Image: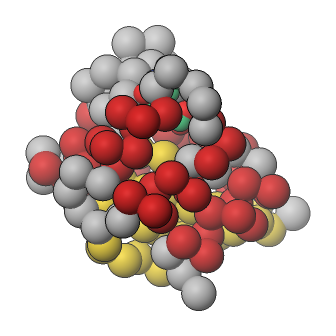
Amino acid sequence: MVERTLMIIKPDATARKVIGDIISMVEDKFEIRGIIMKTLTVEEAREFYAVHKGKPFYEALVEFMTSGPVVGILLEGENAIKRLREVVGATDPKKAAPGTIRAKFGTDVQRNAVHASDSPESAGYEIPFFFK
Ligand code: UDP
Ligand code: MG
């Protein structure tokens, strides 16, 4: 099934100037349907990560995600949601498979370079934060 999914290049990765490197790793595997750079407001970040409200890392995550510009990338392709999660790798860069985006560009479990929608429901909720 052709799906759409959202990747976000997080503030750690935009600060490290690896936007181009990360886009290169998805451009050959998916159709890029949109790219936008923006700085999330605290309100937007809290809503985007609402599923994690109350968890010990939530407040720090919101602070991190609003600390600088991010790049929202709308990707499309056959099984795009699952395939993007594979290209992105595990949440903790130290546990991410070699060659994945997080293994290459992540720093720690919070500053892990990118976000990727994890289900059709998440993609449907997350895409409108960047693409109306
Ligand atoms: N996160 C964190 N500490 C944790 C787990 C997650 O700071 O112990 C951050 C990290 O940036 C992660 C985001 O919260 O990407 C969302 O967590 P989730 O478990 O949904 O991981 P993901 O779906 O991004 O792999
Ligand atoms: Mg998640």
- Considering only vertical position in the picture, is 61 above or below 128? above
Among all residues in the image, which is located at the extreme left? 16
- Residue 94 to residue 12: above or below: above
Q: Is residue 62 left or right of residue 76?
A: left
Question: Which percent across, then down, holds residue 88?
Answer: 50, 38
User: Coloured how?
Assistant: secondary structure
Q: Residue at 39% across / 22% down in the picture? A: 109
Q: Which residue does the image show at 48% across and 80% down from the upper left?
A: 34
The residue sitting at the top extreme is 95
Q: Residue furthest right?
A: 1
Residue 96 visible in the current orientation: no
Task: State which quarter of the image contains the N terminus.
Answer: bottom right
Residue 37: x, y in percent? 30, 73
Q: How many marks?
A: 0
Q: Is residue 10 left or right of residue 26?
A: left
Q: 5 or 122: nearer the eye?
A: 122
In the figure, 39 relative to 45: above or below? below
Q: Is residue 121 visible?
A: yes
Foreground: 125 or 78? 125
From the image, which quarter does the C terminus lie in? Answer: bottom right
Q: Position of residue 8 (x, y in %)?
A: 43, 56
Residue 21, how many percent across, how many down?
25, 51
Q: Quadrant of residue 108?
A: top left
Compared to 10, does 100 lie above or below?
above
- Residue at 50% across / 75% down in the picture? 130
Between 75 and 92, the residue placed more toward the observer is 92
